[in-house]
Image: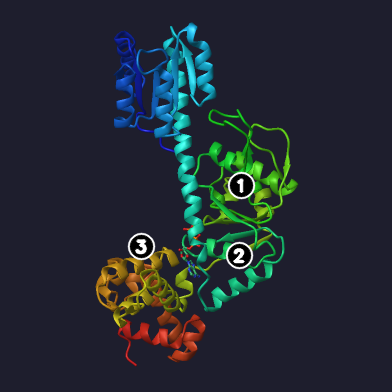
Amino acid sequence: MTAPAVKPSVLVVDDETGILETLRILLKNEGFTPHVALGGRQGLDQIAALAPDIVITDVRMPSVTGLEILSAARAKDPDLPVILMTAQADLRSAIQAVNEGAYYYIQKPFVNGDIVAILRRAAEHRQLRVENRSLRQEISRRDRNSASQPVGRSKAWLSVLRLAETVAPTESTVLIQGESGTGKEVIARYIHQLSARASGAFLSINCGALPESLLESELFGHVKGSFTGAMKDKSGLFTAAGGGTFFLDEIGETTPSTQVKLLRVLQQREVIPVGGTEAVPIDTRLLAATNRDLEEEMKRAAFRSDLFYRLNVFALHLPPLRARRDDIPLLIDAFLHRAAQQRQTEPKRLTEAALDAMQSYAWPGNVRELENALERAVILSEGETIDIGTLPERITERRAEPLVTSQVTAANPTLDVIERAYIMWVLQSEGGNKTRAAEVLGIDPSTLYRKLSRYGVAE
Ligand SMILES: Nc1ncnc2c1ncn2[C@@H]1O[C@H](COP(=O)(O)OP(=O)(O)OP(=O)(O)O)[C@@H](O)[C@H]1O
Ligand SMILES: [Mg+2]
């Protein structure tokens, strides 16, 4: 899952050139990027200048000691692992140092294999801490997005909202499926807001963003010492979301081992922290989402069917944006108003050509793609109006060439070609009656007129 870190950089601090040289060669051979500092003073300078991934330092040095190196390193970066090398006589201060946050101490003289093993673990530990940090950022980023209310009045979207409103006040687990960018998280928050748990927390995690071990410790918590870096007991997100709602995003990305544990949580309503034995009861409403087809995944045995049925107590399928084109103008309007609010200006407007292009584009990335396209256009257009030139090219490519059947029978017709052929077919089978055709297609007559005129179909 996580790419192995580029060669972790290790700063070696010692006042004996022999040791520096030995370690430099050893570390280089073992896939690290070594830096050496002769004595504590140089060590301090290099910690500041190099920002190494790991520091390994002698304890007893004249002028600046290993303990001072330790505290300087921790002041600069609390996630920076520091390993102390000590002679027998300094054992007490080394143990003391570990209590103060040193990662490890190793006795001189050391066996090469030992020091390499410790450095590898330190590098892994470092990696986990850095990922943890980005996880925290991810969580707060999501919090900032909490304001977005579901926009849309198309039939397809309203029926999703009605279902969401029906299930919201219950305690039922809900599985939200839909293509990427269709609003799964928007709906999850909507359900939370309309539930009895609305005043509680809404926490979420992206199951695809973390390696298994880190994901499990975030979900279930862990007990002190259960893995390198687990300095104390920590409760998981299931517990942290107590009284509220927990949203498991991208649940299709979980491994079989995590799936078994999730199943247990759903059945027993309790979690067992990583490395622990005692179950902790939870009081959390669970919502889950995925853009994978879980039924397909079950057939391939990539997703446990017992977990699927536990999650799928209530199923919501979000329509892709191309199946609810009537919502496009509303979404555009909402996003332009939001942009205006953020910039404290009047909302910009789309030219007819720009609106047209957006109405007929296939939106494979759904609402998110539309939101991003508008954000970009707002920035690029200088005046009050947004013209076609500020939209991404894929959206504005001309598609007005006359429809020929060969395009449809081509190996990979674009959605647009298929849409056009489908519309013409419906229109024909409705005897050319546009109002009836629009009804069959589930779109506004005005939308149909616009499309037809773009296809060059005479009134
Ligand atoms: N109906 C909607 N009304 C307003 N904004 C929406 C709507 N649907 C989606 N959005 C916006 O589009 C973006 C994508 O929505 P969201 O994150 O909920 O999609 P998703 O289905 O979870 O996508 P992914 O599978 O890529 O995670 C968000 O910025 C969200 O605010
Ligand atoms: Mg999402």
Bin the neighbour count of mark 2 within 10 Å (Cα to Cα): few under 14, some 14-19, many 20 and up: many
* Colouring: rainbow
Q: Amino acid at mark 3?
A: Ala
Please indicate whether residue 13 sits to the left or right of residue 199 in the image. left
Lower sequence index among marks 2 and 3: 2
Q: Which mark lies nearer to you, 2 or 3?
A: 2
The numbered dot on residue 278 is: none
Quarter of the figure with residue 202:
bottom right
Residue 353: horizontal and vertical position, in percent? 29, 80
Residue 209 in view: no
To which residue does mark 3 refer?
Answer: 411
Query: Mark 1: which secondary structure?
Result: helix
Q: Which mark lies nearer to you, 1 or 2?
A: 1
Residue 42: horizontal and vertical position, in percent? 29, 21
Query: Mark 2: which secondary structure?
Result: strand
To which residue does mark 1 refer?
Answer: 237
To which residue does mark 2 refer?
Answer: 316
Please tell me which residue lies in front, 85 or 90.
Answer: 90
* Labelled pair 2, 3 in contact (Cβ < 8 Å): no
Lower sequence index among marks 3 and 1: 1
* Labelled pair 3, 1 in contact (Cβ < 8 Å): no
* Labelled pair 1, 2 in contact (Cβ < 8 Å): no
The residue at 69%/46% (across/down) is 265
Bin the neighbour count of mark 1 within 10 Å (Cα to Cα): few under 14, some 14-19, many 20 and up: many
Quarter of the figure with residue 404:
bottom left
The residue at 50%/67% (across/down) is 148
The residue at 60%/32% (across/down) is 232
Please indicate whether residue 248 sits to the left or right of residue 427 in the image. right
Q: Amino acid at mark 2?
A: Leu
